[in-house]
Structure formats: C-alpha cells, structure tokens
Amino acid sequence: MSTVTTGASGVRVGSLDPMTPECLTVARRRRETGDVVTLDLLSGRPPHATAAYRPGQFNMLYHFGVGEVPVSVSGDLAVTERVVHTIRAVGAVSRALSELKRGDTVGIRGPFGTSWPVDEARGADVLIVAGGIGLAPLRPVIYHLLRNRSAYGRIALAYGSRSPEDLLYRRELDRWRRTPDFQVRVTVDRAQSDWPGDVGVVTALLPKLRLDPAETVAMVCGPEIMIRFTTLALEQGGVARERIFLSMERSMKCAIGLCGHCQLGPHFVCRDGAVFRLDAVRELLELREI
C-alpha cells in the first residue's frame, strides 16, 4: 500500500510581494444560508491565474478599512476567469466581506498552503467527509473527481450540518445525489419530520458507504471536534493514517509563517498546511491547549 503525500505551498500569482494584495472585483454574490455567502471574484487582467490554484489552498481576503482573513478557494478550478470563496460571517472582517455587492473591490493575497492529494489518490477509492462550512474547501475536490471520474475508484461524500437550513450548495447536493457512481450521504443534527435524509453525527454515515478501507484516501474538513472523531472512526474502520488528510484552518494571520499566530506544535498552519496528513498531526489533535 502506497503512502500519499501533499503538494508544496502555493506561489503568489499577482504581485511578487506576498504581503501585497491584488485587487479583484466581485462578479457575483450568492447567499447560501443565513450567515454564509459565496463570492465570485473577477480579476481586472483577464483571465485571473486560477490555473495556479490547487484544491485545498486558501487566499487572504482583504476588506479595505476593516482587515483580512484566510478563506479557502471553493470553486471549480477549471473555470479560470474567476476565483470563488464561500464565507461565513463570524467576525468583523468576514461579516464585512459577506456584505459586499457586485462591483465592489476585494484585496486578495495568495494562493497559499498545501493541497488535497487529488493527483496522488488516482486509482484509489476517495472518501470526502465534511462538516458545516468544511464542505467549501472540499468542493474543488468534488469538481476534480467528477471531471476525472475514470481516474479513481469508488468515490463518496459524507456531509453533516446542524440543520437542513444550514446545508451549503443545496442545488449541487441534489445534483450530486443523482450523479451515477457517486455515493452521497447527508446528515443533520436536527430536522423536522419532512427531512428525507439521515439525522445524527457524520461518523454514523461512514459504515453506509461502499469503500475498500485499505485502498481509500480520506479527506476531512470541519470543526476540530468533528475532525477528531472522524479520523478516529476512519482509523478504527481500517483506513491507514498516512491515507487520511485533514484541513486545520486556525488563527492564520500573515499566511507566510512569519507572525506565529497559527503555530501548531512544530508546524505553522499557513505554511505547512492547512491540509495535513494525519500521521503528522495525530498527537497534536489530542492536545486541546495547542
């Protein structure tokens, strides 16, 4: 059984100075849930170099006069004329970004970080496990897998959310459910009686998926408590640590490993992640104070 590795950190596609933002224009704004929006950003120098992006990488988005935050790229990377970000309004900067309208200007630095191992996983079964807003960084992986379907074994998505109203990309979820040879299971923590899907934690979906654990590459993103329980369930189910990948987007400020805000043991999340292989960070996941 081969070991899967992640790609190297990204390279600046605009200014040569990684701390200097490039200005992009909001081409489209879509509301996903009550506190989540998706912004399509268009460069003033077409086409924007989104071909340089890899699934799982992030940008630093800057709202002029407010500040900047890290946000994963969440669109189809084959569409090179724009770059897409899904943003949850949880603080001053993300709230200001989520209120932008078509034609507004956004500062952007990036891409930064490691990527999901979509190339290394060719020939394997691929399991995507997402919780809440964690589906956004994994959506580019889904686009890639479906576009290159013959290059992979069985593929599956297990997605959990607080309620049906909090589900992201609902139209796409419906389309993915109807896609042949793509297993999609969705669960919510609470729902009314008319909810047709599962109710409960996302780990309860894993035994319902048809995958070969010894040949599966798993990619996991969501709240840290969900990541801890999901990776444990995957290991107990026979998926090797070196074939489990997770995204840990926490406390990133500079995106280039200088400020130290995102230090995780010996790692800097912005420079060495945000996508990590489980065997590199398993012990650190158990240390709540880090």
Image: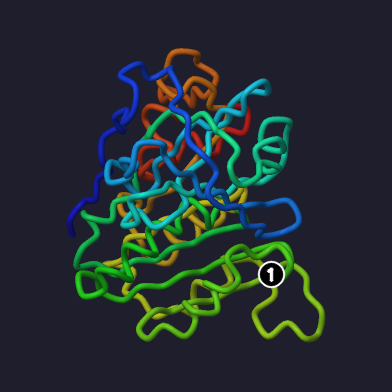
Q: Which structural element holds mark 1?
A: strand
| Quadrant of res 204 | bottom right
Q: Amino acid at mark 1?
A: Val
Q: Quadrant of the N terminus?
A: bottom left
Name the residue at 34% across, 28% down: 14
Left or right: 58, with 32 as reference point:
left
Left or right: 226, with 267 as reference point:
right
Residue reaching furthest top?
A: 258
Name the residue at 35% across, 44% down: 277
| Quadrant of res 211 | bottom left
Q: How is the image coloured?
A: rainbow
In the depicted structure, whether residue 152 falls above or below residue 192: above
User: Which residue occupies the foreground of this view, 108 or 204?
Assistant: 108
| Quadrant of res 257 | top left
Give percent across and percent down for residue 2. Answer: 17, 55
Give percent across and percent down for residue 268. Answer: 43, 24
Give percent across and percent down for residue 5. Answer: 25, 45
In the depicted structure, whether residue 53 falls above or below residue 252: below
In this figure, which residue is indicated by the disc labeled 1?
188
**Tally of marks:** 1
Give percent across and percent down for residue 168. Answer: 61, 62
Name the residue at 52% across, 49% down: 27
User: Which residue occupies the foreground of this view, 194 or 210?
Assistant: 194
Assess disc 1: are there few (<14), some (14-19) or many (≥20) residues with their C-alpha within 10 Å of its C-alpha.
many
User: Which residue occupies the foreground of this view, 10 or 182?
Assistant: 10
User: Which residue occupies the foreground of this view, 37 or 142?
Assistant: 37
